[in-house]
Image (tube, rainbow, N blue to C red):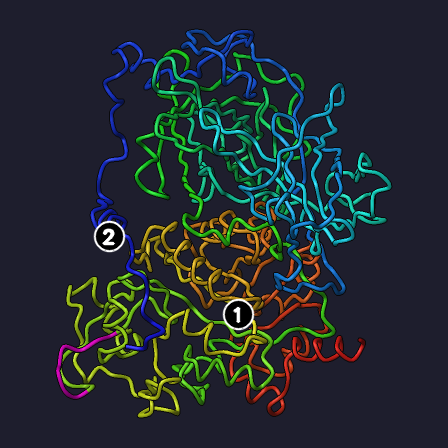
């Protein structure tokens, strides 16, 4: 085995937990015995939210002050409180013509002994509500960009939006810094939730002049998120998960969420959600819930602050995602109230006043043991009326995202590129699996796909990025390979002797993948199609389809180091020139349904958090300034990658509107509107659809770009030169295609090399 492939042993406890999970276990588990029988029935059936002093009924204001009050179980449903609803559109993406994004650490300032310092008051106007403002930067007094070493500012007396702190900085040395807003975690003073931060590509800058006296104090006063002459655009973004986990309760992602007796399909609802503790005398230690209303018709998202209100829901056209954060959800349950409301002109409008108790359909209750234990899943809850009668069901999927542990590099706020896209002089070219699909009978790639040789050759022919697929092996090593399945033989000699067996990549260790005789899964496609009939997962050598041409034109030379299959992600970082960008497709299953509505391609998988964390750790440790983009067909994995880190952009891959591919169970992959809706809801950089529908309807390009999203495309249609030129003219930002060594004339420099040379000439 290559020395570069040796990894630090993975935590054995994590391995055991992954191996011992029982997917067949019931999700409708009983309440813990700590509650009385009456209280169990109350939560299980009535499911009413605990009330705090001063609140009317169960529509409470979820403020930090309310969390600190004593809770008791409510027994009635009085009139709900009418409070203002805050609506905010998804933030626009910043497009920069050209800015320096060096990854150098040379800008850190260390104060030497005897060096003159001056006191500087850092002051910022920011609306932090129940949170607090912090500052971090490139000096020790500012925490050297580390979140957990950042300095908390003090709220100015009598001025709720003005925060300041006095710090010592060296004289006439360039100071760089950023402000951020955090929120304390209830019951855990050492942790905080990272709410938002300033995301200028180059950070703020300040140089202190020599003081006229020892008492002289400088002052730097700014507006949060505002820099330079642009007073209208706030350069801020949501923080990422550093101390808290985040729970997503998703309604409508797998189809209609509500099924209420005697209600027609066009019924419009108002949904409210309230957390409660299943233990008496314990405060709820999660953040206030927020709701994202995703419009499938508009392809956009609106966020609702649920302070005393709710979120409208029309399940014909909308999805709703409730989100909240906590250090530990172990004792936290949720009640979801369902009201009927009149039809409205827009999907985002709310009735005034909010509906009374007479309009309440019922309530569903979600207990912690129904959603803990796995990072994702689906649940069907019973909706009970106020008379304790079942009136329908509420179907939801959940996603539990944890912060990445043991990765200090992730705590740095020095750089971010996650929602920036530099405008280049031309469309970018991305080599699909390097030089292309080497198992396609018509392409005949000159190097085996997803090998170092193929990726490096694509870079030599001018590829700005190379696209490749990353899995986890059984021993949790990120490796590069496209298919979920491989075909292997138990024969000791002869590649095609004996029987071939289909195995998932995740079920083999790195050593096994790199040492066993493996065949591409296309040799088993015909046999796999009959598995459900005869139950046999083997195939004889005679089933091999020679048209798949196993290792492309280089068959017989796969023993050479750069032509070995299953290179590790770490090996790629060390082997490919730094100017070649990486388009890393994270391989994670996305179940599909066939024409009969049956679920297909439902491969087993690792825990989503484990998969994302393992890949992110390799990227952060070995990227060293390389341009990187994450993509994935699974929308939840895109959300996870975006919430766990801030540095690298994430884009949503989709084969929407292409009849050659299956229909995913998750509706977010059904259309371009669904894809843009998901990207907008979770601050993704953009989408990567198949190019076929865009070539048939070029106006779709402008519809995506109107959402201020970056647009890549993929697919075999991109292998035609005319289609490449057409998409460049319509404004597509980048194309992923095969045979880049044939479609681009001769070896040439890519865009990043050319831009670097131009910059050097300018100096």
Q: Residue 12, which numbered label?
A: 2
Q: Is residue 174 visible?
A: yes
- Please state which of residues 756 and 355 is positioned toward the viewer in this rendering: 756
197 in magenta: no
Give the position of the N terminus as an image quadrant: bottom left
Residue in the image at 76% along x and 22% along y: 159
Q: Is residue 2 above or below residue 118?
A: below
Q: Please report the bounds of the magenta region as a residue range.
A: 487-494
Magenta span dominant secondary structure: loop
Indicate the position of residue 462 as horizontal and vertical percent values.
Answer: 60, 83
- Whether residue 468 sits left or right of residue 224 in the image: it is left
Q: Residue 582, which numbered label?
A: 1
- Please state which of residues 439 and 198 is positioned toward the viewer in this rendering: 198
Residue in the image at 24% along x and 83% along y: 544
Q: Is residue 668 visible?
A: no
Indicate the position of residue 204 as horizontal and vertical percent values.
Answer: 73, 49
- Whether residue 628 sits left or right of residue 121 in the image: it is left
Indicate the position of residue 746 as horizontal and vertical percent values.
Answer: 61, 92
Quarter of the image where one finds residue 369:
top left
């Amino acid at each position: 085995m290559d020395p570069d492939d040796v990894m630090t042993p993975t935590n054995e406890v994590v391995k055991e937990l992954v191996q011992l999970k029982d997917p067949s276990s019931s999700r409708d588990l009983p309440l813990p015995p700590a509650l009385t029988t009456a209280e169990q029935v109350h939560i299980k059936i009535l499911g009413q939210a605990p009330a705090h002093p001063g609140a009317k009924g169960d529509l409470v204001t979820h403020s930090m002050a309310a969390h600190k009050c004593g809770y008791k179980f409510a027994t009635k449903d009085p009139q709900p409180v009418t409070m203002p609803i805050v609506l905010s559109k998804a933030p626009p993406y910043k497009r920069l013509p050209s800015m320096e994004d060096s990854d150098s650490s040379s800008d850190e300032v260390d104060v030497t002994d005897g060096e003159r310092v001056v006191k500087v008051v850092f002051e910022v106007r920011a609306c932090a509500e129940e949170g607090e403002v912090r500052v971090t930067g490139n000096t020790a007094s500012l925490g050297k960009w580390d979140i957990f070493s950042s300095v908390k500012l003090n709220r100015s007396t009598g001025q709720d939006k003005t925060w300041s702190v006095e710090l010592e900085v060296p004289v006439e040395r360039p100071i760089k810094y950023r402000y951020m807003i955090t929120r304390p975690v209830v019951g855990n003073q050492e942790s905080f939730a990272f709410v938002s931060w300033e995301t200028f590509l180059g950070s703020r800058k300040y140089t202190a002049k020599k003081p006229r006296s020892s008492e002289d104090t400088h002052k730097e006063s700014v507006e949060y998120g505002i820099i330079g002459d642009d007073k209208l655009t706030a350069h801020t973004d949501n923080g990422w998960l550093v101390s808290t986990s985040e729970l997503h309760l998703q309604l409508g992602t797998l189809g209609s969420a509500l099924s209420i007796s005697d209600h027609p399909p066009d019924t419009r609802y108002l949904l409210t959600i309230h957390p409660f503790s299943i233990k008496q005398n314990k405060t709820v230690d999660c953040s206030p819930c927020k709701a994202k209303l995703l419009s499938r018709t508009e392809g956009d998202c609106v966020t609702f602050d649920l302070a005393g209100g709710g979120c409208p829901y029309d399940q014909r056209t909308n999805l709703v995602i409730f989100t909240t954060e906590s250090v530990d959800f172990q004792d936290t349950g949720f009640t979801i109230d369902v009201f009927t409301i009149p039809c409205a002109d827009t999907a985002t409008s709310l009735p005034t006043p909010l509906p009374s108790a007479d309009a309440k359909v019922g309530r569903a209750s979600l207990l912690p043991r129904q959603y803990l234990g796995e990072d994702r899943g689906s649940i069907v809850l019973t909706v009970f009326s106020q008379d304790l009668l079942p009136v329908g069901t509420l179907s939801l999927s959940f996603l539990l995202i944890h912060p990445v542990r043991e990765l200090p590099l992730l705590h740095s706020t020095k750089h971010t590129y996650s929602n920036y896209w530099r405008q280049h002089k031309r469309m970018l070219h991305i080599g699909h699996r390097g030089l292309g699909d080497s198992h396609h009978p018509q392409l005949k790639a000159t190097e085996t796909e997803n090998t170092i040789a193929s990726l490096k050759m694509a870079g030599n022919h001018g590829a700005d990025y190379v696209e490749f697929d990353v899995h986890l092996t059984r021993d949790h090593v990120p490796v590069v390979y496209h298919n979920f399945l491989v075909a292997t033989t138990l024969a000791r000699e002869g590649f095609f002797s004996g029987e071939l067996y289909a195995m998932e990549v995740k079920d083999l260790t790195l050593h096994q993948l790199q040492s066993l005789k493996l065949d591409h899964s296309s040799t088993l496609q015909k046999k796999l199609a009959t598995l459900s009939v005869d139950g046999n997962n083997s195939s004889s050598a005679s089933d091999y389809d020679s048209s798949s041409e196993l290792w492309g034109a280089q068959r017989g030379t796969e023993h050479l180091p750069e032509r070995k299959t299953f290179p590790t992600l770490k090996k790629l970082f060390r082997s490919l020139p730094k100017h070649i960008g990486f388009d890393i497709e994270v391989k994670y299953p996305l179940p599909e349904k066939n024409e009969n509505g049956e679920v297909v391609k439902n491969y087993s998988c690792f825990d989503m958090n484990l998969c994302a964390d393992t890949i992110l750790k390799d990227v952060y440790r070995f990227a060293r300034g390389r341009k990187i983009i994450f993509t994935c067909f699974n929308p939840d994995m895109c959300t996870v990658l975006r919430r766990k880190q801030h540095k690298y952009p994430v884009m949503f891959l989709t084969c929407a509107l292409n009849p050659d591919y299956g229909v995913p169970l998750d509706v977010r992959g059904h259309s371009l509107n669904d894809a843009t809706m998901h990207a907008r809801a979770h601050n993704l950089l953009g989408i990567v659809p198949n190019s076929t529908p865009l070539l048939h309807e070029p106006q779709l390009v402008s519809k995506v770009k109107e959402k201020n999203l970056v647009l890549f495309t993929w697919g075999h249609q991109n292998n035609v030169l005319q289609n490449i030129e057409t998409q460049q003219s319509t404004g597509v930002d980048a194309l992923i295609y095969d045979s880049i060594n044939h479609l681009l004339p001769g070896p040439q420099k890519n865009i990043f090399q050319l831009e670097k040379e131009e910059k050097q000439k300018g100096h």
